[in-house]
Amino acid sequence: MRNALIYLALLVTGLSLCAQEADTLAVHDTVEVPAGRSIPMNGVFLQPLQERDSVLIADQLVYGFELRQVEEGTRFALPEWKNDERGGVRVVSPWIVDTVKIHRTKKGMPRLMDIRGGMVITSFDEGVYDLPQIMVGRLSKDGVIDTLVFDPMRLEVKTMPVDTATFVPHDIKGQIRYPLTFAEVLPWLGLFWLVSLLGILAVCLWIMHKRKDDPAFIRRDPAHIVALRELDKFRGNKLWVPEKQKVFYSGITDALREYISSRYGISAMEMTTAEIFADMKGTDAPEELLSQVQELFERADFVKFAKYVASDEDNSTVLPLAVRFVTETYQTEVEEESKNGGQE
């Protein structure tokens, strides 16, 4: 009786030091398991942390017990494991107790829980080891002390076999070179094609910029189309007024000068009126029409440089004369080209 009271006092003291909250189920402790009623139990387990067919040296395993439907308020004292200095099985991590499941009960009844406790063990020596019994002290909420005894298990630790008869030592292997896959090459191919397209685009833009100012690549309208388009801007009599006659005559004569330069190859833009028509005498332009156009240029010189004011009658004949000069000389060019084409 006296021994039972001493064990009970040790149990209560150890549990009170390690107690958690009021509703905590299991208490971790490493005191000696007290005496009391011994109850054989099932539920011991030995589970490797690494899934293998066998246990090798230095593999870690969880050795512990499982209890089902434990009433809330029950306290436990866990046994202490002392490592043997000579080797064998050693403890890596102390006891860890977890609540696996909580069962529903009627209102007002204590909860029932499934608990699982275990410690992590390992061995660095090959051999077969009989693990010690797991004896857990249980103190119910009614003050009843029991010792739950779980049958021990056997642990077999193996090592990698070495065939000494056919064993041949090998040198250190070199770095492994994995084959190149298409998925690895694909981003670089995409980058190569992107850079290539950007390079081609840059070259095309540079060529277009260079040809922009190159006369050989500039598409120009025929000389007569350009001249008629410019002359069409001066239709109407609003430019006949004295203060605008200079602009009127300058615009028409400039359009004709450009046409003569393109049609006959004469530098009419830099030449005087006399020089232009002196060179025009040897062309295919009709003499009568050429004489009328020369009078137009001379009148324009008077308007631009001598402040001459032309009459409305003279002004009305300027634009039709310029248009007729362009169209008749253009028709002459077309007839000559058709004759040359027919002879060929």
Image (spheres, rainbow, N blue to C red):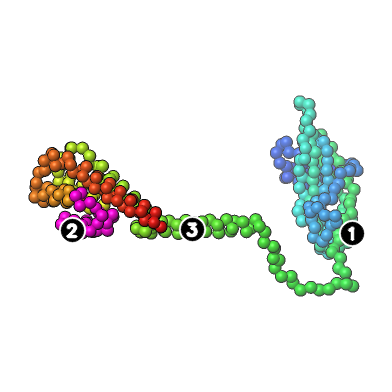
Q: Position of residue 268 (x, y in %)?
A: 22, 56
Given residues 237 and 122, the one toward you in this image is: 237
Q: Position of residue 216 (x, y in %)?
A: 37, 59
Gap between marks 2 and 1, in whole Å? Answer: 128 Å
Q: Residue at x 72, y 45 (%)?
A: 17
Q: Is residue 258 visible?
A: no
Q: Residues within 10 Å of mark 1 (few under 14, many from 20)?
A: few
Give SS at disc 3. Answer: helix
Q: Quadrant of residue 211?
A: bottom left
Q: Residue at x 83, y 59 (%)?
A: 56
Q: Which residues are magenta?
A: 260-289
Residue 283: within the magenta? Answer: yes
The amino acid sitting under disc 1 is Val
Give SS at disc 1. Answer: strand
Gap between marks 3 and 2, in whole Å? Answer: 53 Å
- Mark 3 highlights which residue? 200
Identity of the residue furthest to the top in this view: 107
Instruction: Check the image and report above or below for 63 versus 140.
Output: below
Residue 22: within the magenta? Answer: no
Q: Residue at x 26, y 52 (%)?
A: 259
Given residues 158 and 168, the one toward you in this image is: 168
Dot label at residue 278 = 2
> Of callouts 3 and 1, which one flags the residue occurring earlier in the amino acid sequence?
1
Given residues 258 and 94, the one toward you in this image is: 258
- Mark 1 highlights which residue? 128
Task: Select label 3 or label 2 by which is in front.
Answer: 2
Quadrant that contains the N terminus = top right
The amino acid sitting under disc 3 is Ile
Give SS at disc 2. Answer: helix
